[in-house]
Image (cartoon, rainbow, N blue to C red):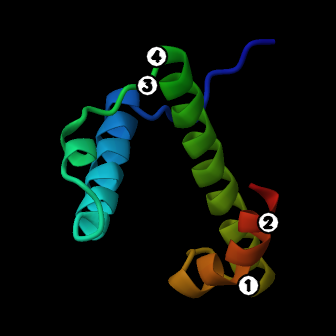
């Protein structure tokens, strides 16, 4: 049985996020390093990008499911930020 994922993340969005994070990291370290590394373009294969997108998707799905379970354990039907906070340490340990 082949099931369709609940949602998919666009690999181009993941690429933009990775490039943005790299840019931020280069700007933070620009005072102590040369500017040549900050001008180089991020290179990532399509396979690696697809794997990264799938890992991010699984992280989001797991976070939502765990936060939902936390809310239900309190008799609530709506997930609140405190439910996400309550599950974050375990979620990070699992990923």
Of labels 2 and 3, earlier in sequence is 3
Mark in the foreground, 1 or 2: 2
The answer to whether residue 20 is above or below residue 47 is below
Question: Measured from the top left, where is residue 78 in percent x and y?
Answer: 56, 75
Mark in the foreground, 3 or 1: 3
Of labels 4 and 1, earlier in sequence is 4
Residue 44 numbered mark, or none:
3
Q: Secondary structure at mark 4?
A: helix
Q: CA distance from mark 2 to mark 3?
A: 26 Å
Q: CA distance from mark 2 to mark 4?
A: 27 Å
Q: Are marks 2 and 4 in contact (CB under 8 Å)?
A: no
Residue lying farthest top? 1
Quadrant in which the N terminus is drawn: top right
Residue 23 numbered mark, or none:
none
Disc 2 packing (10 Å; few <14; some 14–19; many ≥20): few
Disc 4 packing (10 Å; few <14; some 14–19; many ≥20): few
Residue 46 numbered mark, or none:
4
Residue 29 shown left or right of residue 75 in the figure: left
Q: Secondary structure at mark 2?
A: helix
Mark in the foreground, 3 or 4: 3
Of labels 2 and 4, earlier in sequence is 4
Residue 93 numbered mark, or none:
2
Q: Residue at coordinates 51% horizontally, 34% vertically from top-left?
A: 53
Residue 75 numbered mark, or none:
1
């Amino acid at each position: 049985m082949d099931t369709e994922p609940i949602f998919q993340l666009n690999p181009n969005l993941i690429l933009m996020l990775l490039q943005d994070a790299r840019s931020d990291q280069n700007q933070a370290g620009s005072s102590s390093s040369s500017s040549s590394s900050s001008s180089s373009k991020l290179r990532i294969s399509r396979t690696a990008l697809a794997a990264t997108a799938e890992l991010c998707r699984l992280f989001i799905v797991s976070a939502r499911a765990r936060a939902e379970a936390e809310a239900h354990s309190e008799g609530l039907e709506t997930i609140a930020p405190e439910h996400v906070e309550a599950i974050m340490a375990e979620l990070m340990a699992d990923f």
